């Protein structure tokens, strides 16, 4: 096949189709196509051999000396045995070729070769020894040869093309190598060594030889994927994309373009979006999610907020059902402890993907990463993002969906940014505003704040006033920003215009939301802990540092359900280091039971306003009454914290509590746009860095490799029994809570069953007979773990239930006890399943609620007590979900998680 035939195989840029009939594979490069045709179809394609390689096709041309030396070095480095020539095999004892008849049966030939090898190994293992002890000492080293002539080769290839073929294709090999490199964060040198090492166990004539660049190209990571944006170090303006232009074009600036200095990297947004949407099942889940709307009018996700619903009105952006919306997250993270270098990643998420899949790493778009000391000039950094988003809004992206019947559907979608989340510091830089401790630091209202004493210094407080501050509108904010730009002076908190204002339908005052993880948890809740347990407040009436030992005892006895991965840590010398997830668990579940009886009642009741208000805004079904109550609770907390703790605690985080409810009404529950998923992404980003070089490129390569591996696993060419598939599954560190059920049962799934004998009393059997009609032991089997409503449910008898309590289960509805009381939970001791009907039953003790922990407050946190010692049996279909149980001395307090989306 000549070069002209190869060129006709090009469909478009980076797309080449194999011309061989019944193949038609799509490949990314011309050279890749040639290698494919040579390896898969045994056809030499393309240009003739180069002048210095004519020896490969012409026997009269001698091999260059340099080539001979290189081949010799390669064989020595890999300890290769002499190649098989013609119809030869090797005698392992003498290493002398033995000629065999080419007409011998191939299977007999292969069998003889294996038998020869095994017999030689037997000779090594069963050498003569004078005593049993001596034999034991030498048995470990007897397999090692005394010389290379006695060392059998690693593999033996019979002279047969059918036996020569590998079960692993070249693309699978490249994918597996990429997965290994990504899983263990290998450096470029380590990847090169792994590829060299893999050659030691392969025949000489293989096509697995590759370079790091080829490895990355196999994951779609070529020169078109990344874009380098070079900026001037003098004026922080982007240089012209023209490579010939070396001088800064800013008037009056003398800056020069320097290679590989002062730049940031962005990924191809179109490629990333297409890769996600074309992954099997993603677009189908988006369409299903569009059709799922709340019939009760409650707010259950971002898509049920008023801001999103407005876009779905006739003529709105989402009136076209194929259009999508995006959420933006930006933050700075320190890179190294020994330097001031930091990273500023910019993430995007597709809001139409169902919540349980939306926040997974494989569905994240990493638009760009800035690396350097200090902070980037945000308008300069985000200007290319605005251009990409404008292009996505105007032109969109076209992708293809392949059905199970192999029908290809072309879909065009457009995308628009509707939400941006960031902490106070990043928000000030992105919005071109004064910092949170400056005049008019609130983005959402005109409250100027005031300077108040704080210890030996001063701070800016945002006190609660009788007359609420004026809410900023988008028009007022834009006017202030324009004046600030024209006069080069701060105007009502603005220092200039933000580049985000150039996005369609985007407003800083309504689309830049408040992050509850940074604001409530790491801000307000952590500050409250400082008030109560920091010795510098020992003279205050709210200080309870002397009681921290008693509170630590309560924390050590708490056994959270499996959904909460972090076990409670004690307060003593620890609360300063608590993670945001630990502070969330403390705020919602641990705090009130721990503080009850220790913190003065007025302070405890005041803090409960924050607890209940936050819980309500985190649920998956927020009603209008919930919004009204949450707003009243949070405003009560803000208005009274000044009186109880002083003006110095009235920070911007506290002030922002009064603005939370309007954003929940617009854009859904707090978890729909919190920073929790991205803190996890930041951690994975830092783990993917293995050097101080081009860190940004390492991050993009790691993310792209994992996405490509995930996509390949879902493709039809892999099956569950495929060896490569199993390897790729092991290399993917997903840490998801997905579980596989052993079998299906009536209205639940069996995750784990047991063959141990049933420990059922005659009374248990009688109860079962009344429910299922039989009381014969042989009709039942033991079950230790089930799944229902998307939750795993354990039993107390399971040995692993030592530090976690996933066996106290909330009931679907109240259950009457023998005393006529209403039980709403059960502590499950064991499960059994009736074999014929496959109905599962739980044995345990019922728990009865005796009211909230505080009268009239926090109704989700109930005080529980056992219904005597009576053991009951209830059907598994009455179980709802595991509960959080907090034991305090002889009392129990229980609550369910506010949503099933957020995880540690």
Image (spheres, helix red, strand yellow):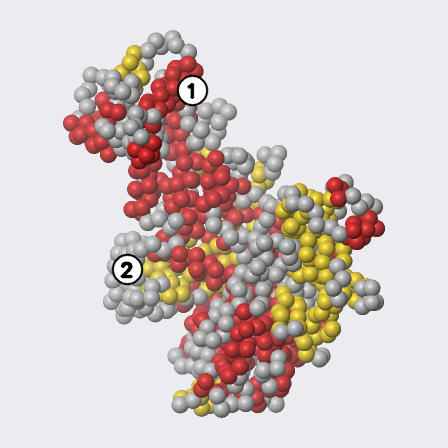
Where is mark 2, residue-wise?
Answer: 261
Vertical order, 777 against 548 (above or below): above
- Residue ranking furthest to the front: 131
Q: CA distance from mark 1 to mark 2?
A: 54 Å
Whether residue 813 is visible here, answered yes or no, is yes
Q: Residue at x 62, y 73 (%)?
A: 888
Q: In the image, residue 446 lies at what x, y percent?
A: 53, 83
Q: Tell me if residue 303 can be seen.
A: no
Residue shown at 54%/52% (left/top)?
736
- Of tags 1 and 2, the one toward the viewer is 1
- Of 95 and 289, the residue lying toward us: 95
**In the picture, residue 354 is in which quadrant?**
bottom right
Return the mark for residue 162: 1
Indicate which disc residue 855 carries: none
Mark 1 or 2, nearer chain start: 1
Q: Are marks 1 and 2 in contact (CB under 8 Å)?
A: no
- Front-most of 556 and 695? 556
Position of the N terminus by quadrant: top left
SS category of the residue bearing label 2: loop
Asked whether, in this view, residue 113 is left or right of residue 903, the answer is left
Q: Residue at 69%, 57% (x, y): give it.
A: 828
Is disc 1 placed on a helix, strand or loop? helix
Q: Is residue 447 above or below residue 564?
A: below
Left or right: 259 as drawn, with respect to 667: left
Q: Indicate the position of residue 792 as horizontal and vertical percent values.
A: 63, 54
């Amino acid at each position: 096949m000549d070069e002209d035939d190869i060129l006709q195989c090009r469909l478009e840029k980076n797309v080449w189709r194999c011309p061989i009939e019944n193949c038609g594979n799509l490949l990314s490069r011309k050279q890749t196509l040639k290698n494919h045709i040579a390896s898969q179809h045994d056809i030499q394609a393309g240009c003739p051999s180069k002048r210095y390689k004519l020896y490969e096709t012409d026997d009269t041309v001698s091999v260059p000396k340099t080539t001979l030396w290189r081949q010799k070095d390669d064989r020595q480095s890999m300890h290769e045995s002499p190649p098989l020539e013609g119809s030869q095999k090797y005698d392992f004892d003498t290493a002398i070729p033995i000629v065999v008849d080419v007409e011998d049966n191939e299977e007999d030939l292969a069998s003889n070769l294996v038998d020869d090898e095994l017999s030689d190994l037997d000779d090594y293992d069963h050498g003569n020894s004078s005593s049993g002890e001596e034999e034991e000492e030498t048995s470990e080293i007897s397999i090692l040869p005394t010389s290379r002539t006695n060392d059998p080769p690693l593999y033996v290839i019979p002279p047969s093309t059918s036996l020569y073929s590998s079960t692993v294709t070249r693309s699978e090999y490249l994918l597996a190598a990429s997965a290994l490199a990504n899983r263990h964060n290998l450096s470029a040198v380590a990847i090169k060594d792994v590829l060299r090492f893999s050659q030691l166990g392969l025949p000489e004539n293989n096509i697995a030889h590759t370079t790091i660049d080829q490895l990355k190209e196999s994951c779609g990571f070529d020169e078109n994927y990344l874009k380098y944006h070079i900026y001037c170090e003098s004026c922080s303006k982007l240089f012209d994309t023209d490579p010939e232009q070396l001088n800064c074009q800013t008037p009056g600036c003398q800056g020069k373009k320097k290679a590989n200095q002062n730049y940031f990297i962005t990924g191809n947004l179109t490629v990333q979006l297409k890769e996600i949407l074309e992954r099997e099942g993603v677009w189908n889940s988006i369409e299903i999610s569009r059709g799922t709307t709340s019939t009760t009018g409650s707010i259950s996700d971002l898509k049920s907020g008023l801001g999103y619903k407005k876009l779905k009105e006739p003529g709105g952006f989402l009136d076209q059902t194929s259009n999508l919306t995006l959420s933006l997250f930006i933050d700075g993270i320190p890179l190294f402890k020994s330097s001031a270098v930091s990273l500023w990643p910019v993430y995007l998420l597709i809001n139409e993907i169902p919540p349980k899949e939306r926040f997974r790493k494989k569905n994240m778009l990493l638009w760009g990463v800035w690396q350097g000391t200090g902070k980037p000039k945000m308008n300069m950094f985000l200007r290319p993002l605005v251009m990409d988003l404008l292009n996505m809004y105007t032109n969109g992206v076209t992708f293809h969906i392949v059905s199970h019947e192999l029908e290809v559907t072309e879909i065009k979608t457009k995308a628009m940014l509707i939400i941006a989340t960031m902490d106070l510091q990043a928000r000030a830089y992105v919005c071109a505003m004064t910092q949170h401790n400056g005049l008019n630091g609130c983005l959402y209202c005109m409250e100027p704040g005031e300077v108040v004493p704080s210890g030996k210094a001063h701070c800016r407080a945002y006190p609660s006033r009788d007359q609420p501050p004026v809410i900023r509108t988008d028009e007022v904010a834009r006017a202030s920003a324009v004046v600030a730009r024209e006069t080069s002076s701060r105007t009502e908190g603005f220092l200039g215009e933000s580049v985000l204002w150039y996005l369609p339908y985007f407003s800083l005052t309504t689309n830049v939301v408040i992050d509850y993880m940074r604001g409530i948890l790491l801000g307000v809740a952590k500050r409250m802990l400082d008030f109560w347990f920091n010795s510098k407040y020992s003279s205050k009436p709210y200080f309870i540092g002397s009681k921290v030992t008693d509170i630590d005892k309560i924390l050590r006895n708490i056994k959270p359900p499996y959904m909460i991965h972090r076990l409670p840590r004690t307060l003593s010398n620890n609360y300063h280091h608590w993670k945001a997830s630990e502070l969330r668990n403390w705020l919602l579940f641990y705090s009130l039971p721990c503080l009850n009886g220790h913190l003065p009642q007025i302070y405890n009741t005041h803090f409960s306003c924050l607890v209940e208000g936050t819980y309500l805004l985190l649920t998956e079904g927020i009603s209008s009454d919930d919004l009204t109550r949450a707003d009243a609770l949070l405003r009560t907390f803000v208005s009274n914290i000044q009186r109880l703790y002083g003006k110095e605690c009235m920070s911007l985080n506290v002030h922002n509590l009064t603005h939370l409810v309007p954003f929940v009404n617009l854009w859904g529950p707090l978890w729909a746009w919190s920073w929790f998923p991205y803190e996890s992404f930041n951690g994975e980003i830092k783990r993917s860095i293995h050097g101080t070089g081009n860190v940004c490129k390492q991050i993009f390569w790691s993310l792209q490799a994992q996405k490509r591996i995930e996509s390949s696993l879902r493709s039809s060419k892999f099956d569950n029994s495929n060896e490569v598939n199993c390897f790729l599954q092991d290399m993917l560190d997903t840490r998801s809570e997905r579980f596989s059920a052993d079998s299906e049962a009536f209205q639940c799934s069996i995750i784990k069953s047991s063959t141990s004998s049933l420990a059922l009393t005659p009374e248990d059997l009688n109860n079962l007979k009344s429910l299922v009609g039989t009381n014969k032991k042989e009709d039942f089997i033991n079950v230790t773990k089930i799944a229902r409503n998307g939750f795993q449910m354990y039993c107390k008898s399971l040995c692993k239930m030592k530090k976690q309590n996933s066996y106290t289960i909330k009931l679907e509805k109240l259950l009457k006890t023998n005393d006529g009381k209403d039980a709403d939970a059960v502590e499950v001791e064991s499960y059994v399943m009736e074999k014929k009907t496959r109905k599962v039953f739980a044995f345990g003790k019922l728990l009865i609620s005796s009211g909230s922990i505080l009268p009239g407050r926090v109704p989700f946190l109930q005080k529980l007590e056992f219904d005597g010692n009576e053991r009951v049996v209830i059907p598994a279909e009455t179980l709802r979900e595991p509960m959080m149980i907090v034991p305090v001395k002889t009392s129990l307090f229980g609550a369910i998680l506010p949503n099933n989306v957020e995880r540690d």
